[in-house]
Amino acid sequence: MKLSIHILTYNCAAHISECLESIITQQTTFPFEIVIGDDASLDKTSEIIKTYVAKNKNIHLKTHAKNKGILDNFQDTLQRCQGTYIFDLAGDDYLKSSNALQILVDELDSNPTYSFVDSGFDCYYQRSGKVSEFENKLQLELSKEKYINRHKVYGTSLMGCCYRKSAIEKHVDFEEYKKQNIDFEDYPILTDLMMNTEFGLIPKVLSVYRKHRDSHSHKADSYLRAKLYFAKKYNFSKLELTKIYQVHEEHMLHNASLISDKKTGRKNYKPFRQPMFRNFVYFLSSQSHLARKVFNLFRKI
């Protein structure tokens, strides 16, 4: 099997059909499979997927009786994939280009030393219904050295990434992630691959990322924990460490602004000697329910 589409789902009933339709209508010169791990969804996600399984022998679903969490579900689903390459797609995201899979596979075929390729995506903000086109354009236009340096501090979404499975098996240690109490997959996998292998960047929009407040990226503490682990493992610079802590404070301040958490807002706004206007807005929202309601009118998520 040339390619496996690796999909994790949890309560994706509203969007899983759009996701699957965007995959099964892809134009490719190679066969591919769709491997889905449903993490004990409470809605009709599994029932909807089963209607597709009944029509397509290359769609494989495993429904967990109990919620395993992102990292365990990712690992379990990955082990079921038979493809040489793995394209990761969330159950509420979808492919935008009808030849997206062909473009990704051609790039990996042409560059046998690449462990993965990253590609462009649009960002659809669920709350506002607005679309930010080519959300990661600036990132994909960086040199690879600057791409890595940016990732160390800010992270990189798995969205748009296609992997060589053998590279993951060689360089990624899921059991070590668990020992370090890391409970998500994108930053860890990409960091280990970036620091040990070659990779490619495709500056084209191939998919659409659906962004909402419930996304795992809002769990700032676990993200900081993972960054600090890899900072020690790969000897990040003092400047990079300083920036990592600053990004964490901004993240915590943003989260406080969503619920008017005064204590957290004050704690994470205080370190900024010359705070950006955006952070000042977040601070006001964290201190005042009225300010939060006003600024909510302008939020994307």
Image: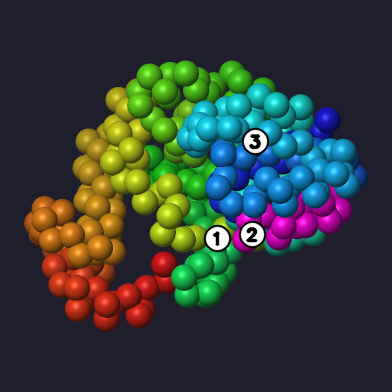
Compared across the picture, whether 27 is left or right of 267 comes to right
Q: Residue at x 72, y 33 (%)?
A: 85
Question: Relative to 28, is 21 above or below?
Answer: below
Q: Which residues are magenta?
A: 13-28
Question: Relative to 192, is 90 above or below?
Answer: below
CA gap between label 3 and label 1 equals 23 Å
State whether residue 1 appears in this view. yes
Q: Secondary structure at mark 2?
A: loop
Compared across the picture, whether 6 is left or right of 149 comes to right
Any mark on residue 15, and which?
2
User: Identity of the amino acid at label 1?
Assistant: Arg
Contact check, label 1 and label 2, Cβ < 8 Å: yes
Tag nearer the camera, 3 or 1: 3
Q: Which residue is mark 3?
A: 63
State whether residue 236 appears in this view. no
| Label whose residue precedes the other's in the sequence (2 or 3) | 2
User: Identity of the amino acid at label 3?
Assistant: Thr
